[in-house]
Image: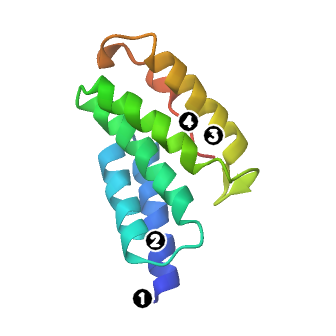
């Protein structure tokens, strides 16, 4: 399998895991992609990794960790607009801000409304 195919496969496996709510798995696929291959959009992938780890932290009961990563991931998307990797980045950035605002209204990870997770479409 050539590198281009492997890179696409890792990205799509991460996307599939993300859509299934398997945030730790999504993080692992994207981490492999980010760390093992040259990518022109390495910063974008790093943002997706941080986003998924934020939700993984919530699943493990770590609200502070989730808050820290949702804030940091936003910095990674600043230079991206429109559609990138078939993801509407403008919508994604707004949805991430909504999640961050909601994080600040809850005291326990179990209070999180999972329907606020960006869909990545």
Q: Mark 4 — residue? A: 118
Q: Which mark is residue 9?
A: 2
Dot 3 and dot 4 residues touching (CB under 8 Å): yes
Against 20, residue 105 (above or below) is: above
Secondary structure type for disc 3 = helix
Q: Mark 1 — residue? A: 1
| Crowdedness near tag 1: few (<14), some (14–19) or many (≥20) residues, C-alpha within 10 Å | few
As measured in the structure, the alpha-carbon distance from the residue carrying label 2 to the one carrying label 4 is 21 Å
Q: Which mark is residue 92?
A: 3
Measured as percent of width and height from the top left, residue 106 is found at 39, 11
Nearest to the eye among marks 4 and 1: give it: 4
As measured in the structure, the alpha-carbon distance from the residue carrying label 3 to the one carrying label 4 is 6 Å
Mark 3 or 4, nearer chain start = 3
Task: Judge whether residue 22 can be spotted in this image.
Answer: no
Mark 1 or 3, nearer chain start = 1
Residue name at image x 55 percent, y 50 percent: 76
Against 113, residue 48 (above or below) is: below
As measured in the structure, the alpha-carbon distance from the residue carrying label 2 to the one carrying label 1 is 10 Å
Secondary structure type for disc 4 = loop
Measured as percent of width and height from the top left, residue 112 is found at 40, 18
Mark 2 or 1, nearer chain start = 1
Dot 2 and dot 1 residues touching (CB under 8 Å): yes
Mark 3 or 2, nearer chain start = 2
Task: Judge whether residue 99 can be spotted in this image.
Answer: yes
Nearest to the eye among marks 3 and 2: give it: 3
Mark 4 or 1, nearer chain start = 1
As measured in the structure, the alpha-carbon distance from the residue carrying label 3 to the one carrying label 2 is 22 Å
Measured as percent of width and height from the top left, residue 20 is found at 41, 43
């Amino acid at each position: 399998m050539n590198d281009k195919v492997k890179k696409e496969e890792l990205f799509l496996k991460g996307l599939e895991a993300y859509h299934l709510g398997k945030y730790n798995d999504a993080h692992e696929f994207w981490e492999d992609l980010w760390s093992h291959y040259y990518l022109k959009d390495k910063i974008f992938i790093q943002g997706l990794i941080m986003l998924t780890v934020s939700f993984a932290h919530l699943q493990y009961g770590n609200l502070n960790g989730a808050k820290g990563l949702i804030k940091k991931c936003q910095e990674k998307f600043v230079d991206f607009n429109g559609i990138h990797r078939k993801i509407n980045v403008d919508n994604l950035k707004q949805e991430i801000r909504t999640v961050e605002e909601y994080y600040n209204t809850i005291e326990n990870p179990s209070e999180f409304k999972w329907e606020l997770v960006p869909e990545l479409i």
